[in-house]
Image (cartoon, rainbow, N blue to C red):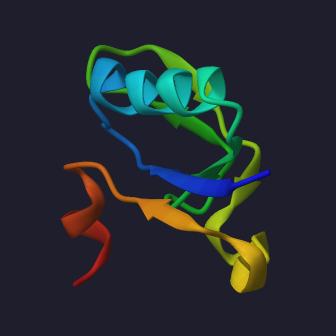
Amino acid sequence: MSKAVVFFAEGTEECEALLVVDLLRRAKVEVTVASASGSREIVSSHKVHITADALAEEVDYSDVDIVVLNSEWEKYCE
């Protein structure tokens, strides 16, 4: 089974992020939602509360096939 990590961050656009997770899971890809915000609890741009599966630093990337970054990711690259 393929594996993917989808990064979420504080203020993420929930439709943009969750649609990717939904489509990958429908395609039978094992998806881990990883928080780049330092907390598993994330509040989206429209104040929807989302709980990530793991923090970005907790994920084992050695067997991941794809990493997906959403549009809020650039805030955490500074």
Instruction: Choose top left, top right, bottom left or bottom right for residue 14.
Output: top left
Residue at (75%, 54%) from the top-left corner? 54
Locate residue 13 relative to residue 62 in the image: left or right. left
Locate residue 72 relative to residue 22 in the image: left or right. left
Image coords of residue 38 (percent x, y) = 59, 63
Residue at (60%, 29%) from the top-left corner? 27
Residue at (71%, 32%) from the top-left corner? 28
Instruction: Choose top left, top right, bottom left or bottom right for residue 19.
Output: top left
Residue at (53%, 21%) from the top-left corner? 22
What count of labels does the image hold?
0
Locate residue 12 relative to residue 54 in the image: left or right. left
Locate residue 30 relative to residue 75 in the image: left or right. right
Viewer-side residue, 25 vs 33: 25
Viewer-side residue, 55 vs 64: 64
Image coords of residue 40 (percent x, y) = 69, 46
Quadrant of the image containing the C terminus: bottom left
Image coords of residue 56 (percent x, y) = 63, 68
Viewer-side residue, 63 vs 27: 27
Image coords of residue 31 (percent x, y) = 68, 44
